[in-house]
Amino acid sequence: MIGRLSGRIVDEASDGDLIVDVNGVGYEVTAPLGTRGRLAADGTETVTFYIHTHVREDALQLFGFASLEEREAFRTIISIANVGPKLGIAILGAANVHDLAQMVARGETAKLTTIPGVGKKTAERLVLELKGKLAVLGPAPARPDRTPAVAPAQGTKAEMLSSALTRLGYRPIEADRAVAALTQGRSIDDVPIGELVREALAVLSR
């Protein structure tokens, strides 16, 4: 079983799938959206993933995470009946472990249903079965201070988009680049935030 991979990311799909080159061998790793921005590099473009190896009769899949905490949360999530790895990845791509633990502790099923693939019954099951299993370890993850490269002239909608992207794990400079691209020559005030996030993810995947 593979538990950890260290290498260079040589390709990234818009859905978060990555190709990690480890000494000339390319491993296909499925990771939550924003994982690349949370990975710590050592100054040589080498990054380390904590891997969950998922074995089925017809496939062997590698799921990668930026921290041991994320991997353990993923394993806890997929231990729930009818919650598979694909949905587990979607959940951790939409909410970090701290925020997910808070939603579960507070029984916020409505927030959970905003995650793609999570319906009302699944949200209720997540709250019921994850309560007490996802420890809230200290304060929410720190977000680096930043001075935007492009001032959010579009007002609160641009700020909301930037915040959503950083919460997904993208670096502030990446969020600023996406906001700048989407606000160039257009107003985004009337565009739903969900649609803006999808457009921003497409920009960041280029």
Image: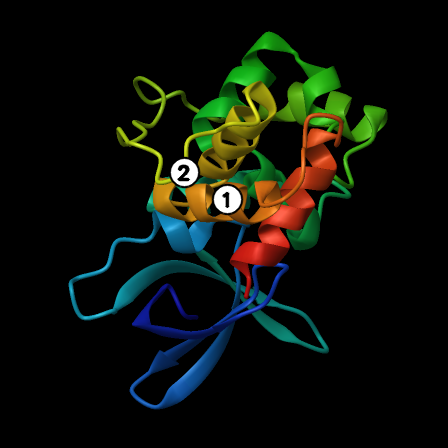
Q: Quadrant of the N terminus?
A: bottom left
Looking at the image, residue 176 sits to the left or right of residue 48; the answer is: right
Residue under pointer 2: 150
In the image, residue 138 sits, relative to residue 149, either above or below, namely above
Q: Are marks 2 and 1 in contact (CB under 8 Å)?
A: yes
Q: Earlier in the sequence, mark 2 or mark 1?
A: 2
Looking at the image, residue 157 sits to the left or right of residue 57; the answer is: left
Q: Quadrant of the C terminus?
A: bottom right
Query: Could you tell me the amino acid type at mark 1?
Result: Ala
Q: Distance between the Cα atoms at labels 2 and 1? A: 6 Å
Q: Whole-percent x and y of residue 69?
A: 37, 40
Quick check: can you spot residue 181? yes
Query: Residue drawn at (23%, 59%), measured in percent from left and top?
Result: 41
- Report the coloring of the rendering: rainbow
Residue under pointer 1: 180
Query: Could you tell me the amino acid type at mark 2?
Result: Val
Q: Whole-percent x and y of residue 28?
A: 52, 75
* 153 and 113: which is toward the camera: 153
**Picture quarter containing residue 15?**
bottom right
Furthest-left residue in this view:
43
Q: Element under label 2? A: loop
In the image, residue 35 sits, relative to residue 100, either above or below, namely below
Query: Residue drawn at (46%, 78%), measured in percent from left and top?
Result: 27
Q: Whole-percent x and y of residue 42?
A: 17, 62
